[in-house]
Amino acid sequence: MSGEADQRGMSPGMQAAIDRLNLMGTNTQEALFSGFAQLTSKAQLCQFLGIKTAKLNFLLYKLKPAHRYKTETIKKRNGDDRLLRVPVPLLKQIQRIIASELAKEYRPRQHVYGYVKGKNIAQKARIHVAQKWVARVDLKDFFPSVNFGRVLGIFRGHPFHFNDELATVLTQIVMDGNELPQGAPTSPIISNLICRSLDFELKRMAKEHRCFYTRYADDLVFSTSLKRLSPQICSPAAPDGVSIQANVGDGLRTLIARQGFTINDAKTRIFDRSSRQQVTGLTVNEKVNVSREYVRGLRAVLHAWFKFGEESAASWFFANHYKRNRPDWKSTPADFREVIRGRLAFIRFVKGADDTTYLALAKKLAKLDDGFQLGVEEQIQVNSPRLMLYTEGVTDTIHLRHALQRFKADGQYSDLNIDWADHSDRPRGEGKLWQNCLNDAKRDEFRHQTQVYVFDRDSDFAKKAEDKYGKLKHHGNNTYSLVLPIPEHRQGRAQICIEHLYVDDFLWQQDVQGRRLFAREEFEHDGNHVGNVEVMYRHPKATTLIVDTDVVGYGSLRSKPVVMSKKQFADAVELGVKPFDAPSLVGFQGVFDMLRDLTKNLTGEVKADASAFV
């Protein structure tokens, strides 16, 4: 008996106690109470769970507290130990039932992503893409901070309103002494229920200071496109703002303390655009992406597999990635293949099935692992030419990428494979973009991937960047430039930028805060609005086509937000924030038609004629 107990990681006393519990048997009678929230007594709870009252009493009151849970240790990413309190099998089974019932009553707020069905880390990270500042705030001892009294209050309060007897029993079932055990099935959902008030207050604070907020368990993230994140929330510890060490603001610290939690200052970080901004392990500088180290690690394993064989590659991989966390790990070839497939699937999940990095890794794995095959669409992607697109700014990329995703979801342009250049660390603007285009064309080494530089039709660069037919212009070395074609609803305009591809009813509408973009022609030479709207433009001599800053209200609009930035507009479109959740994308078809013709020309499916390319 003791040998078997040791093998299962339990003490002999714990194993004996579980054996006694099993001998008591279970109540196989069908539960009489279909609704968890309608329970009023311990007896009804036991019937609902399908166990006898004596068995639950033994588990809660006879079995020693030390025997209800076993401690497991795993390594965190930083090398520190994470202690898990794992319930014994019977208790775990009961907790799973209760967790399922609690989840039915939980209505997660929009900004909560941890332990919520249908939400994931990529969705959370997407909220913070391309922001000037990203702050990560860690809550110290998150689960242990939730004590018996707080959980008891959950069961007593809305929406359950259990009586004291039943609320106490339920609390005893889900608690480990006076702490919420990290490792119990009920702890994630209970922590979310506990944090409902915290989430409401933090969201209100974020809105007040004009930033975004998300929470994934104990990981709080704030981001903003403003020049600085409010010091009431977080600020760089170094005066020059270079350090990623952060000073947590008094406002945020006080709010969190009032909610019964403590900030872990050692793990709190703040990043500007020059740093690698990470949210739940994903980078968000330009788009949601996996880290370079993650990709390099998988590429190295595949290379080792190809060069030294599967056994050597597996041995090296598990020694470096699993032995540190689980010294007793015994790997098999099947384990190795499943892990590698899982890592590749994660890259696919984050970067997309048409991403060039994913496809290159998938192609390598398909040659090594006879149990892994590329899908039909992926095989087409691998064998089709890919275009690398460069734009004048991040909002251009957001609009084009979102439009293509929507088109592909409707079955259009499925043969168009585009990589979006991550040029967050490069100077932006048409002048620099044009120079980069010319430099690429003049490179000594041949560009194997086709480069396409996309320009707005709002300056003299349009004449240089397109051919005499208004089509793509070839500069040599597989490098092209494209000027936005004028859509049908903009015929008669000489100049357009990316936002003009949307129709007016969509483009000029207000958001829920009453803000919107403005057109330059809406303002007189003195800055007053031509339509007698109580707004004024501070820089009336500017030549920009879209006015997204320095518009102020007066009269009834005094001190009210009236203008939204291009970035805010682009984010609202991409995230589907009402009323920007259903754009007409017909204006984008001209761009993708030109790009599709280019790819067909590159594959020889159509002949290039004088009206298409120079």
Image (cartoon, grey):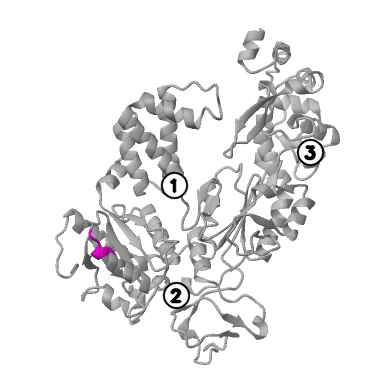
Tell me the amino acid under the disc marked 3: Asn
Identify the main secondary structure in magenta: helix
Q: Is there a contact, CB below 8 Å, between mark 2 and mark 1? A: no
Residue 508 in the image: above or below residue 116: below
Q: Badge 3 is on which residue?
A: 147
Tell me the amino acid under the disc marked 2: Asp
Q: Pointer 1: residues within 10 angstroms few (<14), some, or many (20+)?
A: few
Q: Quadrant of residue 207?
A: bottom right
Q: Pointer 2: residues within 10 angstroms few (<14), some, or many (20+)?
A: few
N-terminal label among 2 and 1:
1
Q: What element carries label 3?
A: loop
Residue 153 percent across, percent down from the top left: 81, 42
Does 582 lie within the magenta span? no
Range covered by the magenta-colored residues: 440-444
Residue 128 visible, this angle: yes
| The C terminus lies in quadrant | bottom left
Tell me the amino acid under the disc marked 1: Arg
Residue 112 percent across, percent down from the top left: 62, 49
Q: Badge 1 is on which residue?
A: 292
Residues 19 and 42: in front is 19
Residue 188 percent across, percent down from the top left: 66, 38
Q: Pointer 3: residues within 10 angstroms few (<14), some, or many (20+)?
A: some
Query: Which residue is the extreme one toward the front?
Result: 239
Q: Tell whether 18 sits left or right of 445.
A: right
Cα distance between the residues tagged 2 and 3: 55 Å
Cα distance between the residues tagged 2 and 1: 41 Å
Q: Badge 2 is on which residue?
A: 504
Residue 374 visible, this angle: no
Q: Nearer the viewer, mark 1 or mark 3?
A: 1
Q: What element carries label 1?
A: helix
Q: In which quarter of the image is residue 463?
A: bottom left
Q: Nearer the viewer, mark 2 or mark 1?
A: 1
